[in-house]
Image (cartoon, rainbow, N blue to C red):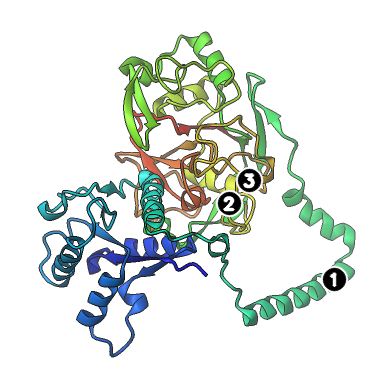
Amino acid sequence: MPRPLRVFLCHAREDKFIVRELYRQLTAEGWMDVWLDEQKLLPGQEWDIEIEKAVEQADVVIVCLSNKSIDKEGYVQKELRFVLNIADEKPEGSIFVVPLRLDDCVVPRRIRAWQYVDYFPKINQTWAYQRLIESLRLRTAKLDISIDKSMTDVKPQRNTLRSHGIRVYMIISAIIVTILMLYFGTLFLSDILAPATEPPAATESPDNQMTMVFVPQSEFTMGSEGYDDEKPIHMVTLDAYWIDQTEVTNAMFAKFIVATGYETESQKKGKSHIFQSGVWIETNGADWQHPTGPNSNIFGREKHPVIHVSWNDATAYCEWRGDRLPTESEWEKAARGTDKRTYPWGNKAPNNTLLNYNFNIGDTTEVGKYSDGISPLGALDMAGNVWEWVEDWYSDTYYQNSPSSNPLGPDAGINKVVRGGSWSDVEDGVRASYRGEHDPSNAKSSLGFRCARSQP
């Protein structure tokens, strides 16, 4: 059986939360043995001996850098010195030390020789993680470590006791429901359930281009135990509304441009951000009509989501239609429904039949292509393809004090919230509760939008 790649996480205690999440993601890949002190050190073991042993045995050391760690005296500096001593013994050109910046800190002089990757801002984390994985795979190949498919297919085993408990609970619940149906009458019970299970038929946008799906008034669970800005999990009640079934397409946006003569911010600037050779770069001549640069066009991409549109551009389009951008809570409810699911399709891990993500295409695809990834309320492409602008300003602490009814987000901010992940994002970034942020005046080739409408 092939051995796993041994990865050591060098970090400061103050960065434990984000490093702990990184540990979880790397371990879930299935082909790495990741060393994190709180997971590997046993009571009674000596820190110095065990950590030095782990670094000596490591194939790769990920050095997590932040303003909390680079100037801090103590164990992290001692750990780093030992890592650098081991690195000096490695063959030239080996990928052994991988600096990972957690915030906008100055890279210490001693490790500037190695290319670092930025794990911030949060909207770029999934891309940074993908780059990190590419380096680890390259190291794996260099060491002739084969990644057995069985290693990547490992799934966590269910808690048997919990499974039995769920079965018992389901049986008891079924008995109770049966008794209630017999007591109150099937007709009465079906009348109660009808509003939740039989929403109004889909409608069309005023320009007769977009199908919109109805989201009934109800309470739903918002947030998750993922990142800090997704906490706490809380209940939100929303009035009924409509939301576009798919992202706005190039063809739809073109009609807006023709009708109004509107010029997008990318067109005014003469440039936008595209993903090229593994990095995001600002490219002259990139805009919604030229998705990959000045020599490209949207012919053949009429049904692809419009990209290179800022929040201001998206707002202008929705207002032209007589609609608006969805609020963050409206977007999340449309994506996950009311049953606390992780993804639009449920809790099953993403794969290439459910959405466009993780560079499986390397570009946008036609909207609505992944029908198996439909949300419980009938919305498509709520995960992957392109990030989507929503109405709200971003705040990482907003959930701590947000209203329980029709929240509208903070009154002000620096960045606007984006949701849903894109064609370049990995599994973590396409969760229905994942929150991204972006400058409302900027645009990129993985960012689009859909509109919403309040129910009269």
Q: CA distance from mark 1 to mark 3?
A: 35 Å
Task: Reply above or below: 137 against 258.
Answer: below
Type of residue at label 2?
Pro
Badges 1 and 3: C-beta atoms under 8 Å apart?
no
Q: Nearer the viewer, mark 1 or mark 2?
A: 2
Q: At 43% across and 56% down in the image, what residue appears?
A: 230
Is 274 or 360 nearer to us in this picture? Answer: 360
Q: Is residue 185 above or below residue 141?
A: below
Q: Is residue 60 left or right of residue 112?
A: right
At label 3, which amino acid type do we have?
Leu
Q: Residue at x 15, y 59 (%)?
A: 70
Residue farthest to the bottom, as pictured: 44
- For the residues labelled 2 and 3, the Cα–Cα distance comes to 6 Å
Quarter where residue 354 is shown: top right
Task: For label 1, count other residues whose C-alpha is less than 10 Å away and answer few (under 14), some (14-19) or many (20+).
Answer: few
Q: Secondary structure at mark 2?
A: loop
Mark count = 3
Spatial CA span between label 1 and label 2 = 35 Å
Residue 329 vertical placement versus 18 (above, below): above
Task: Select label 1 or label 3 by which is in front.
Answer: 3
395 left or right of 146 in image? left
Taking the spot 25% from the left edge, 65% from the top edge, the residue there is: 10
Residue that badge 1 annotates: 178
Tell me, for residue 350, which label it has, or none. 2
Say which element carries label 1.
helix
The picture quadrant where one finds residue 7 is bottom left
Residue that label 3 marks: 354
Q: Secondary structure at mark 3?
A: loop
Asked whether the residues under the numbered discs 2 and 3 touch, taking CB atoms below 8 Å apart as contact, a structural biologist would say yes
x%, y% of residue 114? Answer: 21, 49
Taking the image as shown, residue 86 lies to the left or right of residue 43, namely left
